[in-house]
Image (cartoon, helix red, strand yellow):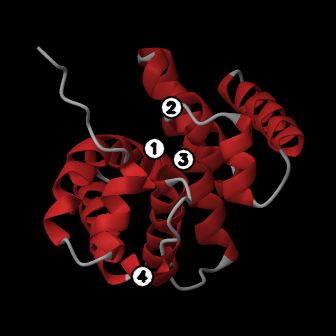
Amino acid sequence: MTADVQPSDEDLMSRVRADELDQLTPLFERYHGPLFGFLCRLQGSAGSREVAQDLTQNVFERVLKYRASYQPGQPFRAWVYQLARHVHADHWQRQRPPAQDLDTVERTAAHGRAAQAQRAAHDQTQGLHEALSLLPEAQREILVLHRFQGFDYQEIGALLGCSAGAARVKACRALEALRQLYFQ
């Protein structure tokens, strides 16, 4: 008995690119969960699971819309995560609140820090996620890609347009910043 050989992500996407749209189903099944997790963690405490679900759906809509931009031989995983990064950035760009006065910003920041300290005492995991959400987006993104999504530094470098060594340095700095926030 022979084992079923699953087509690679790249083969499936090449077929989607050639308008075999039913080939998107296995890609959706493979990447829906990981992309949802990526987008949940990327938005930190500011978002919700419903928003992450909507953003995940938007990623797959863009896969269809921009399928002609996929270059055969290009790693599909890197390409789809790049789409996810753009979907996330576009969503939060549209959601950016209007500028507030300084007093409101200070009260909001103080309230966020107090809430974080209370939750961290109650639940370490929640505290970690809160600290992660306080990181600048670029640092949070690199940690989520590496620690939660399993990307290696070569893949992260390709996504961010830098070398694997530079990606490693950025990840180390982000981890140190997370450590400082978490233990504050």
Tell me where residue 167 sits by quadrant: top right
* Eye-nearest disc, 3 or 4: 4
Q: Amino acid at mark 3?
A: Gly
> Callout 3: few (<14), some (14-19), or many (20+) C-alpha neighbours within 10 Å?
some
Check the picture and name the quadrant holding the N terminus: top left
Decide which of tag 1 and tag 2 comes sooner along the chain. Answer: 1
Decide which of tag 1 and tag 4 comes sooner along the chain. Answer: 1
Is 57 on the left-hand or right-hand side of 147? left
* Eye-nearest disc, 1 or 4: 4
Is 57 on the left-hand or right-hand side of 142? left
Check the picture and name the quadrant holding the C terminus: top right
Q: Amino acid at mark 4?
A: Ala
* Eye-nearest disc, 3 or 2: 2
Instruction: Give residue 148's mark.
Output: 2
Instruction: Give residue 68's mark.
Output: 4
Asked if disc 1 and disc 4 are in contact, CB closer than 8 Å, the reply is no
Is 178 on the left-hand or right-hand side of 166? left
Picture residue at 45% right of the left edge, 20% below the top: 125
Instruction: Give residue 41's mark.
Output: 1
Question: Which secondary structure, mark 3?
Answer: helix
Instruction: Establish if 171 lies above or below 91.
Output: above
Q: Amino acid at mark 1?
A: Arg
